[in-house]
Amino acid sequence: MIPLHDQNPTRRFPVVTVGLIAACFAIFAYELSLTVTGGDQALEAFFSDWAAVPRRISAAIAAGDWLSPAMLGVVTSIFLHGGWLHVLGNMLYLWIFGNNVEDRLGRIGFLIFYLVGGITAALTQVWIDPESPVPLVGASGAIAAALGAFLPGSGPLR
């Protein structure tokens, strides 16, 4: 069953949640434009440059190059998506649950929590398969962190 809303009212408008959704949709629109103008090769090149690529991240960590483009991909990958279902599913869950977590943690607290959740998910995947050349994309790890915080009796919303 896919939820469409929750029953929890918020005290204020979820500025960060809406901003994250807008950013993800804007970047997805750019991804679509790349596909239209340059085909799948252009999109693959974009993902290669901006997604989290475990093999490159592992090499950067081994070299102690913490400010490399590979390490930047750990953050930027959170805003990339691989298709319509991917972006729509992630943004639906972010809209439903993110607003409550943002309401509880505050705007800056939620943004930090969301980014740390996404970064942790990407680095966990790198740890699992450090030599993978496949780019990692999506906000699923960050949204999973928000879901964990939302669940009754867990996370910062206790």
Image (cartoon, rainbow, N blue to C red):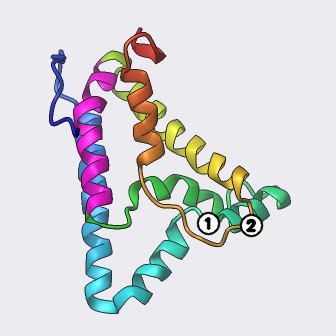
Marker disc for residue 147: none
Residue at the front extreme? Answer: 1
Question: For the residues carrying marks 2 and 1, which lies nearer the camera in this image?
Answer: 2
Horizontal placement of 81 versus 116: left or right?
left
Q: Quadrant of the N terminus?
A: top left
Residue 102 lies left or right of residue 47; in this view the side is left
Residue 131, label in figure: 2
Foreground of the two, 61 or 90: 90
Q: Amino acid at mark 2?
A: Glu
Q: Could you tell me what secondary structure mostly forms the magenta stretch?
A: helix
Q: Earlier in the sequence, mark 2 or mark 1?
A: 1
Residue 89 among those drawn in magenta: yes
What's drawn in magenta, residue-wise?
Answer: 85-103
Q: Which residue is more in the foreground, 89 or 118?
A: 89
The reply to whether the magenta stretch includes residue 31 is no
Q: Secondary structure at mark 1?
A: loop
Count of labels shown?
2
Estimate the x, y position of residue 19 in percent, counting from the top left. Answer: 26, 44
| Viewer-side residue, 145 vs 20 | 145
Q: Residue at x 27, y 60 (%)?
A: 85
User: Circle 2: is it few (<14), some (14-19), or many (20+) Cα within 10 Å?
Assistant: some
- At x 46%, y 77%, the residue is 46
Query: Residue 137 at x, y = what percent?
Result: 47, 60
Q: Kindly identify the residue that appears in the image at 48 percent across and 57 percent down.
A: 76
Residue 148 in the image: state x and y as whole percent: 44, 26
Q: Amino acid at mark 1?
A: Val
Using a 10 Å C-alpha cutoff, classify the residue at mark 1 as few (fewer than 14 neighbours), some (14 to 19) or many (20 or more).
many
Q: Which residue is mark 1?
A: 53
